[in-house]
Image: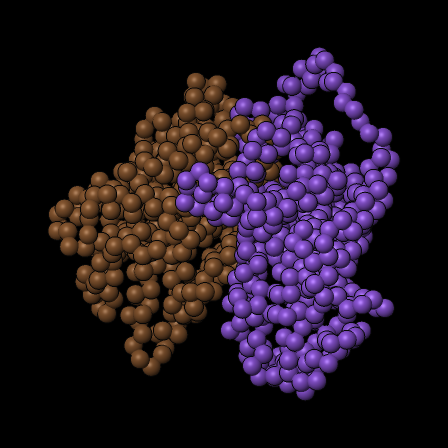
Chain colours: A brown, B purple
Amino acid sequence: MEAASVPARSAVPGQAVRSIISKYGLIVVLLIMPVVFAIEDLTSETDNLSRLGNNLVAGVSNGAIWALVAIGYTLVYGIVELINFAHGEVFMIGSFVSAGFFTTLGLTQSTGTGLLVIGLLLTLPVAMLASGLLNTMIERVAYRPLRSAPKLAPLITAVGFSFILQNVGLLWRGGSQQGITDLIRSQHELITIGGVDISNGDVLAVCVTIPLLLAMTTFIGQSRLGKAMRATAQDPDAARLMGINVDTTISLTFLIGGMLAGAGGLIYALYQTTIWYFQGFTAGLVAFTAAVMGGIGNIRGAVLGGFIIGFIQQISDNRIGSEWTPVIVFAYLILIMVFKPSGLLGEETREAG
Amino acid sequence: MSTTATAPETGTEPTPKRRFDAPPWAEKALIPVFLVVVALLPFGMSSGGTLIGNATLALAYVVMALGLNIIVGFAGLLDLGYVAFFAIGAYTMGWLGSGFFAEVNHQKGVHIGVTGFASHLPGIHLNFFLILVFAVLFTTIAGMLIGLPTLRLRGDYIAIVTLAFGEIIGKIAVNSDQIKLSGVPLLGGVLENTFGKDQTFTAGRQGITPVDKIDVPFVDPFTSLNLRPWYWVALFLVAVVLFVNFRLRDSRLGRAWIALREDEVAAVAMGVPSVKTKLLAYGTGAAFGGIAGAYLGSFLNTVNADQFQFYFSILVLGMVILGGLGSIWGVVLGAITLSFINNWLIPDVLNSLPGDFGLDFDMTQITFAIYGFLLVIMMILRPQGLLPERRRAEEMTHGDETSDETIYTARA
């Protein structure tokens, strides 16, 4: 509908209100919980501002992981309009590969800092490649044969693959949460600024995530292959007519998404120091919430959503109780889906959600 | 978009081989035959053995799968949170048919229509069939409430929202053993007077147990030693649900569901009320889940939060897909098959198979992978299911004609 055919839009007062609600309503809803607890922190007798600060820092580290996973959802959705349900499990496999590779390299807590950094720098590409290739393989096996089938079909195979991978994890490392060597002394405070502790884990999360995000945005924004990805996302038919190999481009998208999830898995393993086969299911849903919150298909949105969700989750863990955190996150997911499926930064999608 | 391009092709295509099509009355004529044959089966089984137990479970799963079939198969709304209705049905049984609310009515309990042992126990004890009514009521409301937010959404978003609801209800079931009813805002005082100070909302992972046995008037009390009466009650539920399913599918409402599934825009343009039709699909499907949930609560003698996990939704979805989306007899077959695979074949027969090959895991450990593999294989090789419904089979195999809602539209 062209704008010209809707004359004097602001003449109807109800419509103006509605457009404001649809624009800012979600932001308000998102802010309720952090703001309530922040006010409580500020007004309480004892100086609790540092608690808010600590939550914020931990939220950023968690958010970095969710951002890396969420980008995988967003890239894939942007290009093939499919929720890659197995993406959380790809992330889980990234964690498992990292943990296995540490042991192979013989890294322990007593390894010197220099060697440790080299070891981690070796592990990162291994985890990324493992997850990336796994994700590409899933696309090849489970999604590509169903290209002309109704949308229901690839979604169901995605769920199926997610189950298969969970079981792989279960057989690999058993059915319970497993502690791994705390290589970087994740919770050890590195510096304290104004009562806010910044731990080794936080530094690691940010130091791995930021360069990766920069590299990825540069790749998608500047390189020829990145251009092909954007073109395919916009219009696969036209992209093919322009000589872009759509198949390769789709594979590449899954590869990049999987690689970022693998990096997220490495950070998760080092930061949380416990891994288990079921971590991917929750992580997948949390990251998907982040992707939807930012506006699915929008990379900056996924990063923003990741950090917001990380923060919300941290506050909920800290103030409401970690057993309720999934409920809070899922409630946010439903609220966003219902009231603003296009998210914070996303444009109205082709069918307006 | 591709419709115009492929239309001439389909015109010149040689007419597909006519398969043998049973006459239209055959599938309904099958109902009495099926029911009589299945009703006679227990005479060939020992009355307390595992076989009849598994068969009873299979019948309960048939009820559940037929419910999900209405939502996914008829109306085409992919529901990944069906376990929510199982949970609500089972908790209805647990709340209204056990000693869980022990403090109620000054520890004397409430008894309606129950005889025998249960009529002297504290707690709320209603007759099973009365509880079924409540279970249907609660799950229908829940189904519509869960359906409400998804009305504007597309297929894959519906899947995620229902999944989120299923997970929320599962988590509430697990965590609510810490929630005291007396702590509920506003109503806390009233609830405390009725249910006592320490009454929790659910029993969490510990589970509400024991749960009342089914109480049929003028029939000997049900015991866990003689499973035949349980089996026949389950069969009775299957009969009711089958009948309702066939009637619904051929009714105006059923045709509206199928129309919405095939092309929502066209259906709405033809005057199908989209909101009402979708909500009715959720409500009806949920009600069947509630019936099966209440039955299973009583049959398994426990209402335990661990039962209500995501994998259960996928198990039921697997039954529907294995049999054939939208095909009633297919879903019955799928539910019976997968139920026996789940409860008998994997744990009892094949469990030690990997060990025989020198692998150090049991078959039960890879149950998830088996279902996952089944879903993938079915979708790739035979998306229409074992006993496909004709119209749905067309959609699944030549999906690109019906809508542009396919992924990879580039290659359509």
Determine the residue positioned at 38% across, 59% down. A311
**Is A332 positioned to the left or the right of A66 in the image?**
right
Camera-nearest residue between B374 and B190: B374
Quadrant position of the N terminus of chain A in the picture: top right
Q: Residue B315 in the image: state x and y as whole percent.
A: 59, 47
Q: Residue B180 in the image: state x and y as whole percent.
A: 55, 77
**Is B76 positioned to the left or the right of A239 in the image?**
right
Residue at the extreme bottom: B106
Determine the residue positioned at 56% across, 38% down. B374
Quarter of the figure with residue B100: bottom right
Quarter of the figure with residue B215: bottom right
Determine the residue positioned at 46% across, 32% down. A139
Residue A110 visible? The answer is yes
Quadrant position of the C terminus of chain A in the picture: top right
Determine the residue positioned at 77% across, 59% down. B229
Compared to residue A264, the image places residue A236 above or below, namely above
Q: Residue A21 in the image: state x and y as whole percent.
A: 54, 56
Compared to residue B325, the image places residue A22 above or below, namely below
**Is A316 positioned to the left or the right of B276 in the image?**
left
Compared to residue B114, the image places residue A83 above or below, namely above
Q: How many marks?
A: 0
Residue A13 visible? The answer is no
Camera-nearest residue between B339 and A141: B339
Camera-nearest residue between A142 and A237: A142
Q: Residue A160 in the image: state x and y as whole percent.
A: 52, 40
